[in-house]
Amino acid sequence: MYQVKIDRNNKIDLPKYTSAADSLKEMMDHFSINQTDFSTHIGISQKHLSEILRRKVFMSADVANRIEEATGMQAMMLLQLDAKYQLEKSRKKRQEQPLNKVVQRYDWAKA
């Protein structure tokens, strides 16, 4: 029998936030739903669903409501996941560009 030794010094870098695409993929995998079937159920094109799942586009409130109707996944949760994901992605990008070269902070601003 093969034994795996765990090295507690190894660090796993998990993303701080996940997008709605991650939740959709997990749900689709769990229930063995393919993209064509799911896109038909929520009334969007398979291409548009594919773009959402690949994070090429983020879902609209309309699509989130359709998903909620079809699956019970809360539209607000899906939209919040995408908003948090986009903010985190933007913050990482901003770290690469020093703030003072693009944005001039007001002296009264604390954030």
Image: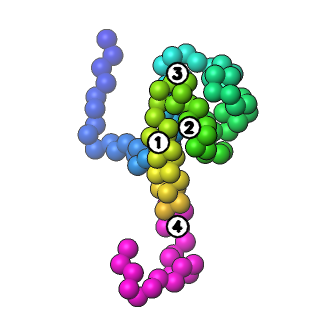
Instruction: Tell me, yes or no, whether the two marked residues, 1 and 2, touch with CB atoms within 8 Å.
Output: yes
Q: CA distance from mark 2 to mark 3?
A: 19 Å
Quadrant of the image occupied by residue 7 = top left
Residue at image position (55%, 72%) is 97
Question: Which numbered circle lies on residue 29?
Answer: 3
Which of pointers 1 and 3 lies earlier in the amino acid sequence?
3
Residues in magenta?
92-111
- What type is the residue that disc 2 sits on? Ala
Q: Nearer the viewer, mark 2 or mark 3?
A: 2
Residue 59 visible in the snapshot? no
Q: Which residue is mark 2?
A: 64
SS under mark 4: helix
* Residue 80 x %, y %: 46, 47
In the figure, is residue 104 to the left or right of 47? Answer: left
SS under mark 2: helix
Above or below residue 68? Residue 62 is below
